[in-house]
Image (spheres, helix red, strand yellow):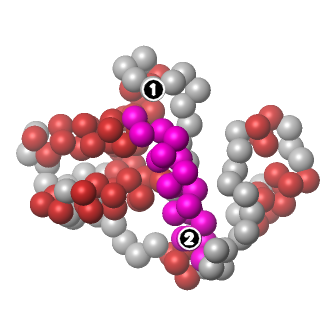
Amino acid sequence: MDTRLDEMQADFDRYHKENPWVYEAFKRLTFQLINAGRQNFSASAVVERIRWGVSIGDYGPDDFKINNNYRAFYARLFHVEHPQHDGFFRTRKQKSADEDATNLPPLKRSWFDEMTDETQQHLNLLRIR
């Protein structure tokens, strides 16, 4: 992979394939907003509403996790699939397109159960301490 964006896109594509219900929920909530007359809205808020819906048992598995990086990918996917609503989510240039790939594996939940050298290396590269 050449850029960090390439890595993030690959991670998103894998997640999206494994969790198709997330995008279905994203679309359903987005169309509720559009039908309520909203001209634009926050993809972050839609993802947080999905998290909330999972927590109260509306949908999704109890152990649902979603990387915040995926919000922009869902917004862009929505715009591509529904061009009549292009711009509903305000997007900007993805800075990761200008960053070198990290060549690290995607974060895994199990890494946080036990901090390993590999996890620490990953977090250091992402400047998370």
Task: Return the x and y of residue 105 as percentages of the image width and height.
Answer: 73, 57
Task: Tell me the chief SS of the magenta region.
Answer: helix
Marks 2/1: CA–CA distance: 27 Å
Q: Residues within 10 Å of mark 1 (few under 14, many from 20)?
A: some
Q: Which mark is residue 23?
A: none
Rendered-image quadrant of the C terminus: bottom right
- Which residue corresponds to the image point at 18% horizontal and 37% vertical from the top-left? 32
Q: Is residue 102 above or below residue 81?
A: below
| Number of the label disc, if any, that sits on residue 6 | 2
Residue carrying label 1 = 60
Mark 1 residue element: loop
**Residue for point 36% across, 43% down:** 23
The answer to whether 42 is drawn above or below residue 60 in the figure is below
Element at label 2: helix
**Residue farthest toward the right in the current orientation of the protein:** 117
The kind of residue on which mark 1 rests is Gly
Which tag, 2 or 1, sits closer to the chain's start? 2
Q: Is residue 73 magenta?
A: no
Residue 95 in view of the camera: yes
Q: Magenta span has 12?
A: yes
Instruction: Identify the residue shown where x is 45% and y is 26%.
Output: 60
Name the image quarter holding the N terminus.
bottom right
Describe residue 82's horizontal placement relative to residue 94 as left or right: left
**Amino acid at circle 2:** Asp
Provide the residue span drawn in magenta: 3-21
Task: Give the camera-side residue of 35 and 129.
Answer: 35
Residue placed furthest toward the top = 57
- Please report contact status of discs 2 and 1: CB closer than 8 Å, yes or no: no
Q: Quadrant of residue 36?
A: top left
With respect to residue 101, does 83 lie above or below? above
